[in-house]
Amino acid sequence: MTLNFPKIVDYLWATTFLLQLVLCALLFIRGYFRRLPFFTAYISLNLCQGVFLYAIYHHYGYNSMAGYVAGWVSEALTLAARVFATVELLRLVLLWYRGIWGLTWRLLACVCPMVLLSIGAFSRSDPQVLVMQVDTGFHVVFAVALVLCLGLIHYYPIRVEPVYKVLLSGFCWYSCARILTNTVLHGYSYAEYLHYWPMWQTLAISSYLLVLILWGSVLSKPLPPMLQRQALLPDSVYTDISPEINDQLQAINRRLMNFWKIEEPPQ
Amino acid sequence: MNYSVAVFASIGLLLLLAMAWLVFSATRRQPRVIRDENRERECIHISKLPQIKQALADSDFIYLNERGYPALARRIQKERRRIALNYLACLRVEFEKLVRFARMVAAMSPNLAVAQEVQGLRLNLEFSYRYYLIYFRMISGIGPLKAIGTLSNMVSALTIRMETAMSELGERAALGAELLPHNRGGLDARS
């Protein structure tokens, strides 16, 4: 009836719990939950997951089947909540950029299946690590999608409030950290050792703890006011100007290609 | 350790680096904006610089070589190469200004064509690649100075066409001006 994790995991767990509690309090007391309902739900769900798993692991032990099932089922729920929270943040950033928002969705619909297929091709055909690989696959797709979205925002003249930037990069950082943790630990076959799960927990919780500190620091300040509605140009402006610019760019590139064919001046 | 570990670890690291670049390049953008503005001021007469083309013409070098001043010809050529490099940088500023305009229009449009945007990105990358190719060849001294003039004409023509298009936007120019202070793109909201 004892929790088998080493003390360090206990401390990390407790710190994460406290930080999430503070974050939840911030979100509710300052009324941020109205603007960020899915993000608030995600933090709350994580908080509940922590308490739930602590109880399960304490009761059944982390190596038990109950602990395994409870761990991964609750993880699936929080991952779903994470997707909703991320979409919510992106929606806030791209609220008045309808064209970019549509482009983002089309791009993701095209890229995500390709990434999934690639993950399938490169994954190990080992049933023992299937769940871990699914988890890694999710984080890869999630991080690729998020980096693509951040890339699009970077490419176009879109104003992003620092608070949203930090929240989004926190999600991305955590996914990247999970990809590396899952992959490297499995790569070195730590799964066969007794200390695999405590080590995995330590690394996963530590990276999440960093994200929580980052989020806490930005949410401790007031949220920026909502962006005012931006007037959009008529469709015709884009359909007229964009091909024109592309034609001109193409002409420049054609000329540049012939650049070296111009006669070299005699020395 | 098998190949899948190497692949996934590389993907994780690459994504991490990409994210860091996207976040931190935006926070460092402010000084670049100022630098670009200085450059824009320097390049304000870019489309009215026949003197540059004149300076790049080979007749002076031929004349000096024929008169028996090869050292002087080399020195002048070196100086003019430096001018040409500056001019090339100005052309890039001009080009980027136009690309920014295209992105601004795209951001303010309710519907975007994926093919157009992908083509724009591809052409932009192509330009960058060719620009740097020319730039490094110029630095290494194997670039024909004469060709700079041709490049100038191309960008100047595009500038005029875009300026016409912008003026056609009429009263919407105010909207564009409103967007311009932070139209350097990306994740920086502090500008």
Image (cartoon, rainbow, N blue to C red):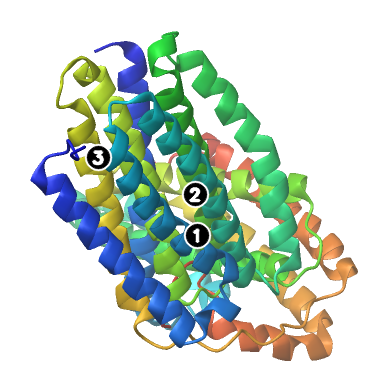
| Residue A33 in sight | yes
- Residue hosting label 1: A42
Residue sitting at x 15%, y 21% = A194
Extreme-left residue of the structure? A7
Q: Looking at the rendering, in which quadrant would you find the C terminus of chain A?
A: top left
Which of the two discs, 3 and 1, labels the residue nearer the N terminus? 1
Q: CA distance from mark 2 to mark 3?
A: 16 Å
SS under mark 2:
helix
Q: Position of residue A52 (x, y in %)?
A: 39, 49
Work out whether mark 1 precedes mark 2 in sequence or the reverse, and give the earlier one.
1
What amino acid is at disc 2? Thr
Asked if labels 2 and 1 touch by Cβ distance under 8 angstroms, the answer is yes
Residue named by callout 2: A78
Percent x, y for residue A131? Answer: 45, 24
Asked if residue B183 lies left or right of residue B77, the reply is: right
Asked if marks 3 and 1 touch (Cβ < 8 Å), the reply is no
The disc placed on residue A239 is none
Packing grade of label 3 (10 A; few <14, some 14-19, many >=20) is some
Comparing A53 with A121, the one in front is: A53
